[in-house]
């Protein structure tokens, strides 16, 4: 009997400014294309969540990671080998859409009405219940 492959960790940066959350819209040609997500990406083999967040935010948004706070939640991503790790992140700079088709700042209420990637949707529902 073979063991299941371990889940591939992905960091999702939960960035808040003035009560609004930063999200990016995924390119159409990628998995969950056209849906909105918290920015981030795969954690490298020798990276911590903080290191992966810093690298991904530089690559995707051209911002510096000013700090990583609490680990907020994690969940498997349905239909994929990924495990999404949602963490609080503070940034320096103004985000630019380098990997996403657009980026924006949204209130929790706005997030609940947006087309979100499935695991991001589950996280937003948790946010809404706790606020």
Image (cartoon, helix red, strand yellow):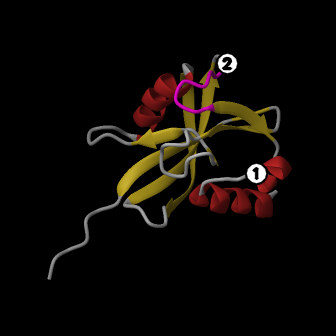
Dot 2 or dot 1: first in sequence order is 2
Overall secondary structure of the magenta section: loop
Residue sitting at x 79%, y 40%: 106
Residue sitting at x 45%, y 41%: 41
Q: In the rendered view, does 14 fall on the left or right side of 131?
A: left
Question: Secondary structure under badge 2?
Answer: loop
Q: Which residue is mark 1?
A: 114
The circle on residue 80 is none
Q: Classify 104 as above or below 122.
A: above
Q: For mark 2, does the 10 Å Cα neighbourhood hold few (<14), some (14 to 19), or many (20 or more) residues? A: few
Question: Secondary structure under badge 1?
Answer: loop
| Quarter of the image with the N terminus in it | bottom left
Q: Which residue is mark 2?
A: 94
In x, y percent, where is residue 128? Answer: 79, 59
Q: In front here: 121 or 12? A: 121
Q: Residues at badges 2 and 1 in contact (C-beta under 8 Å)?
A: no
Residue sitting at x 43%, y 58%: 83
> What is the spatial separation of the Cα atoms under label 2 and label 1, in whole angstroms?
22 Å
In x, y percent, where is residue 47? Answer: 33, 37
In x, y percent, where is residue 40? Answer: 51, 39
Q: Magenta region: which residues?
A: 94-101
């Amino acid at each position: 009997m073979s063991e299941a492959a371990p889940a591939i960790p992905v960091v999702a940066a939960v960035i808040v400014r003035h009560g609004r959350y930063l999200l990016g819209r995924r390119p159409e040609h990628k998995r969950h294309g056209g849906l909105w997500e918290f920015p981030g990406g795969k954690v490298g083999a020798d990276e911590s969540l903080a290191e992966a967040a810093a690298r991904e935010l530089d690559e995707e948004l051209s911002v510096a990671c000013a700090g990583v706070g609490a680990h907020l939640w994690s969940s498997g991503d349905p239909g994929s080998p990924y495990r999404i790790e949602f963490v609080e992140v503070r940034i320096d700079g103004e985000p630019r859409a380098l990997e996403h088709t657009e980026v924006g700042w949204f209130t929790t209420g706005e997030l609940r009405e947006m087309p979100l990637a499935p695991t991001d949707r589950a996280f937003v529902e948790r946010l809404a219940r706790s606020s």
